[in-house]
């Protein structure tokens, strides 16, 4: 039997950050050699004299990092400036499934308009078939228009994307 490679033991974890420290924490974790993912969306903010496009976190107060959850790496992560802690349940760091991170990355890379949505865990689970969002999974909602809710269970947050024109298959 071959020993597991270090990458096989790596999982994604949600990191809770201090207020407005998501980008600082992400940069600090990258500086320590950890793989990170900070989901950002571009918003236009208006001031009295100008409009400016800025990138803001999709999930304020959270960033994601992928690492082998050993005591040494966990200590190194927790000593990063701006980190409050790992999202945990029963004193155990709760991993985020790779599929949820991959789906979120795909939606943001395709620049699909999205908005925060109340967290959903129940409903008709579907997968998009075809197009630029092929394989994205979520929960279907319909209030006048069809939305797909992509949830990150570990942090209890969701985003909604409009899915008019996409073919869906139930899961």
Image: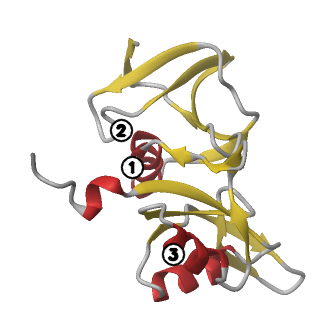
Closer to the eye: label 2 or 3: 3
Q: Nearer the viewer, residue 35 or 109?
A: 35
Q: Residue 48 location in percent, x, y?
A: 90, 82
- Using a 10 Å C-alpha cutoff, classify the residue at mark 2 as few (fewer than 14 neighbours), some (14 to 19) or many (20 or more): some
Q: Is residue 30 placed above or below 124 in the rendered structure?
A: below
| Residue behind mark 2 | 133
| Residue behind mark 1 | 106
Marks 1,2: beta carbons within 8 A: yes
Q: Earlier in the sequence, mark 3 or mark 1?
A: 3
Q: Is residue 129 left or right of residue 46?
A: left
Q: Secondary structure at mark 2?
A: loop
Q: Residue 81 location in percent, x, y?
A: 70, 86
Quadrant (top left/top right/bottom left/bottom right) for the N terminus = top left
The alpha-carbon separation of the residues under discs 2 and 3 comes to 38 Å
- Using a 10 Å C-alpha cutoff, classify the residue at mark 1 as few (fewer than 14 neighbours), some (14 to 19) or many (20 or more): some
Q: Residue 168 location in percent, x, y?
A: 39, 17
Closer to the eye: label 3 or 1: 3
Marks 2,3: beta carbons within 8 A: no
- Using a 10 Å C-alpha cutoff, classify the residue at mark 3 as few (fewer than 14 neighbours), some (14 to 19) or many (20 or more): few
Q: Secondary structure at mark 3?
A: helix
| Residue behind mark 3 | 72
Q: Earlier in the sequence, mark 2 or mark 3?
A: 3
């Amino acid at each position: 039997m071959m020993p597991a490679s270090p990458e096989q033991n790596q999982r994604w974890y949600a990191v809770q950050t201090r207020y407005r420290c998501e980008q600082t924490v992400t940069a600090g974790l990258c500086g320590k050699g950890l793989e990170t993912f900070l989901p950002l969306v571009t918003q236009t903010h208006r001031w009295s004299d100008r409009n400016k496009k800025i990138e803001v976190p999709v999930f304020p107060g959270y960033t994601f990092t992928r690492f082998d959850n050993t005591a040494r790496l966990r200590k190194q992560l927790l000593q990063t400036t701006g980190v409050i802690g790992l999202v945990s349940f029963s004193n155990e760091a709760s991993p985020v499934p790779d599929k949820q991170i991959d789906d979120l990355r795909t939606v943001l890379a395709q620049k699909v308009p999205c908005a925060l949505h109340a967290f959903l865990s129940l409903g008709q689970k579907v997968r998009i078939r075809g197009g630029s969002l092929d394989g994205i999974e979520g929960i279907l909602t319909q209030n006048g228009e069809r939305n797909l809710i992509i949830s990150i269970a570990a942090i209890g947050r969701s985003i909604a994307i409009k899915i008019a024109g996409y073919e869906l298959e139930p899961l």
